[in-house]
Image: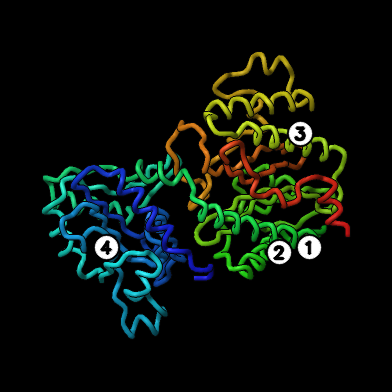
Amino acid sequence: MRYHKIDAHLFVENRQRLSERLPPHSVVILLSNDRMPTNADGTLPFKQNSNLFYLTGIDQEDSILVLAPDHSNDKLRAQLFLTETNSHIAVWEGHKLSKEEGTALSGIQEIHWTSNFEGSLKEIFTECDQVYLYQNEHLRAETKVQTANERFTKKVKKDYPLHQFNRLAPLLYDLRMIKSDVEIDLIKEACRITELGFRAILPVVKPDVWEFEVEAEYLRHFLGNRASGFAYEPIIAGGANACILHYTMNDQKLSTGDLLLMDVGATYGNYNADMTRTIPVNGQFSARQKQIYNAVLRVKNGATDLLRPGCLISEYHLKVGAMMTEELLTLGLLTSKEVKNQDPKWPAYKKYFMHGTSHHLGLDVHDVAIENKKVAAGMVFTVEPGIYLPEEGFGVRLEDDIFIAENGNINLMEDIPIEIDEIENLMNH
């Protein structure tokens, strides 16, 4: 792994917090993600199941966690199953975890090879009534393939039809919403590396530079600082490309007079940063660009002030929409008549700002959460308003990552330049 080893105490505590929420005679079974195929004998880079990582710190494929916290046999209360390596695998794929390394990373003492999994499960199931299994319940999930956890759910229900099966996702999602100090430090490191990348690209961005060259410069600095890479497919969008919300082609040449919108973040220790900055390709904002930029910045700052303990996200989005409406009226992009006659289901401001303002952030970029739960200390959110003007050939989005503290919030990206004067000065000196 590229990142520094995470103290196993984090994962011990996470398992303990989950165990405290389970009814008596329960078992939790969680599998790693599959290594996904491409074509011929190719595979995509492996990405661990974030819930398994949250509970174990294990980044290796074909791993299984089994928790049976009150089992009479204390050796069966927490088990981690890993694939047994051999000389052939070592030659072709490299090092795989030993049992001792599995313990060091996870804090789990009982490490076994996956070949022993089925036999262990039989013994556990004789004492357990409630079985907790995982299925992705994220509201925006669109899964077209059957996952390892879904395949296992189908199998175990067939093999043990008289047990009571339960949803693991709500328990884990509720836990993962509140980040520990160690998790916040990991997110901070992802933000710090993201800042290094942003500052490095400022002197690189000039007319006739390609979007993918900017992307490459970010990646160079991310990897050079122990990030695993990008937290998500980066958006490096010059000119009107910024008005395509999920633009990831990054294959156009930058032109003088254009703005460059960059939605990019590093991932460190599987924890993610999510930043957006919009800068002038020639190092100088035009008067019109400044007008739009400052409107977005005011909404971002106002939204950040709203995002405090006790806030309900659904109400928060309504208030941010009202802020944006006022800015668009001032800019002359909306008329009072349009606002008066707007459809409440799709308010008038959505013509220029059509996406949400905030989402949870953590092990997943759009992190898991229990919907409509009030904002609480320990949560981390993005704040990312934007105004998109395809007819004028540019868009502006600004995004920071916000940690909710007991008495307010802390901007984890406060050191990343965002004010117009600072950006222009850095690009021209």
What is the distance, in whole Å, between disc 4 and disc 1 at their CAs?
50 Å
- Tag in front: 3 or 2: 3
Q: Can you identify the residue that label 4 sits on?
A: 79
- The residue carrying pointer 4 sits among few (fewer than 14), some (14 to 19) or many (20 or more) residues within 10 Å by Cα, namely many
Q: Is residue 232 visible?
A: no
Residue at 54 percent of width and 22 percent of height: 345
Between discs 3 and 2, the one toward the N terminus: 2
Residue 92, horizontal then vertical, whole percent: 40, 82
Residue 286, horizontal then vertical, whole percent: 87, 42
Between discs 4 and 1, the one toward the N terminus: 4
Q: Can you identify the residue that label 2 sits on?
A: 213
Question: Mark number for residue 179?
Answer: none
Asked where in the image residue 228 lies, by quadrant, the reply is bottom right
- The residue carrying pointer 1 sits among few (fewer than 14), some (14 to 19) or many (20 or more) residues within 10 Å by Cα, namely some
Between discs 1 and 2, the one toward the N terminus: 1
What is the distance, in whole Å, between disc 1 and disc 2 at their CAs?
9 Å
Between discs 1 and 3, the one toward the N terminus: 1
Dot 1: what SS?
loop
The quarter of the picture where the C terminus appears is bottom right
Question: Mark number for residue 204?
Answer: 1
- The residue carrying pointer 2 sits among few (fewer than 14), some (14 to 19) or many (20 or more) residues within 10 Å by Cα, namely some
What is the distance, in whole Å, between disc 4 and disc 2 at their CAs?
46 Å
Comparing 241 with 373, the one in front is 373
Dot 2: what SS?
helix
Q: Would you say the residues marked 3 and 2 are in contact, meaning their CB atoms lie under 8 Å apart? A: no
Q: How is the image coloured?
A: rainbow
- Tag in front: 1 or 3: 3
Between discs 4 and 2, the one toward the N terminus: 4
Residue at 17 percent of width and 63 percent of height: 120
What is the distance, in whole Å, between disc 4 and disc 3 at their CAs?
53 Å
What is the distance, in whole Å, between disc 1 and disc 3 at their CAs?
27 Å
